[in-house]
Image (cartoon, rainbow, N blue to C red):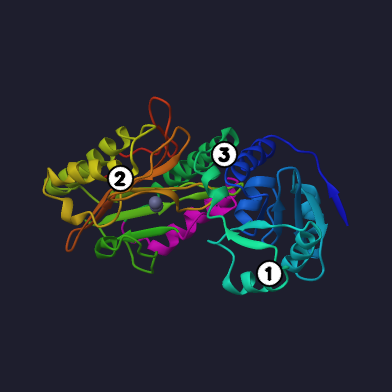
Amino acid sequence: MRGRSRLFYPFASRQKRLRALLETRHFPFLLLSNPLNLFYLTGFRGSAGVAIFTLDEARLWVDPRYTAQAQEEAHGVDVVEEKGGLLQAAAKWLKVRKAGRVGYEDGHLTCAAFQALAARLPAQTKLVPAGGMVEELRYVKDREEIETMREAGLLTAEVFEEVRDRVRPGVREADLAAEIEFRLRRKGAEGAAFETIVASGPRSVLPHARASGKLLRKGELVIFDLGAILRGYVADMTRTLYLGRPDRRVRSLVAAVLGAQERARETLRPGVRAGKVDQVARKALARRGLARYFTHSAGHGLGLEIHERPRLGKGGTERLEEGCVVTVEPGIYMEGLGGIRIEDTVLVGHAEAEILTPAPKDGWAI
Ligand code: ZN
Ligand code: ZN
């Protein structure tokens, strides 16, 4: 069973960009197995599939579970149903084409799959690691992706504002996390992009604490880290609340983190090295003697995955480009006091960056 569907923007443009890369890097064949990359290039959202792109052909092998779905969703590829192994079918096709150099996703294909594939190919066919070619394309988001990520960010911010009203002493962390995830879905998200973090009091010093059965108490800091996944794209946002009237020390620490986040966000511009953003956040905290409490990197790229390139960490050399979407999330974690982190998902623009998770950061004390 097979059939080629029509080729719609944005898939036409993504496939065109991929083929330009294939040409400059001398890959007449590229074998793809990462489902996220198949989704990016074709729109097919199944969890398994193998595709081969050449300069003028593209073919997607799926098992019978996904035939109908692939025929409906996948653009610009010949969909082929395969009841045996997908890689075996791809190998057979490469053999018929007398393929020479075949690129593969060395960051994704397992050793076992690679060996099974290699064993079925004739000696003239060479499997060559192609790195993350599709990930390179995903580095800069196109119009469709930006639209979707804007929506995912807004939805995340709205849910936080709704749930914020329920944050008070005596409430369980896990109940707030469940409330957040329920509301994300009800607003149209596919779910939470990652396990929602609600960490209060002493637990807030763990940057990746899970929501637990602990009850919130007056005088505690509470970190909320949440994000929607919408049509495959994720958002990531953190806010910190204080339960009660904060004293001067807490107020000044929150102001320091907020200041560091703003300084870091202001550095987001095309051409800036990813490491620079981290450096700026770290310097802002260092001026207040807080640098040693900032124990992780300042942010990360995101899109189809919650962590993508670039990594906004110390020494990061990748250059930001217009259309990169990254988080900016400085935080400080002090034993005895708790943690404070403020994170936004931000789009790098031509002139200035746009916050995609526009929930208020002031009025953090309740
Ligand atoms: Zn986060
Ligand atoms: Zn993050």
Estimate how packed mark 2 is, as few (under 14), some (14 to 19) or many (20 or more) residues with alpha carbons within 10 Å.
many
Q: Nearer the viewer, residue 16 or 342?
A: 16
Please tell me which residue is depicted at 53% across the width and 53% down the height of the picture.
132
Q: Which amino acid, mark 1? A: Leu
Q: CA distance from mark 2 to mark 1?
A: 39 Å
Estimate how packed mark 3 is, as few (under 14), some (14 to 19) or many (20 or more) residues with alpha carbons within 10 Å.
many
Horizontal and vertical percent position of residue 291: 17, 51
Could you tell me which secondary element the residue under label 3 belongs to?
Answer: helix
- Is 288 positioned to the left or the right of 190 in the image? left
Q: Which amino acid, mark 2? A: Gly
Residue indicated by mark 1: 117
Count of marks, rendered view: 3
On-image quarter of the N terminus = bottom right
State whether residue 13 is above or below residue 69: above
Q: Which amino acid, mark 3? A: Glu
Could you tell me which secondary element the residue under label 1 belongs to?
Answer: helix
Horizontal and vertical percent position of residue 220: 24, 57
The residues colored magenta run 169-195
Q: Quadrant of residue 198?
A: bottom left
Q: Quadrant of residue 333?
A: bottom left
Q: CA distance from mark 1 to mark 3?
A: 33 Å
Residue at the farthest right position: 1
- Is 255 positioned to the left or the right of 94 in the image? left
Q: Is residue 37 visible?
A: yes
Please tell me which residue is depicted at 55% across the width and 61% down the height of the picture.
106
Residue indicated by mark 2: 275
Q: Is residue 242 visible?
A: no
Residue depth check, mark 2 versus mark 1: number of the one nearer the observer: 1
Disc assigned to residue 145 = 3
Estimate how packed mark 1 is, as few (under 14), some (14 to 19) or many (20 or more) residues with alpha carbons within 10 Å.
some
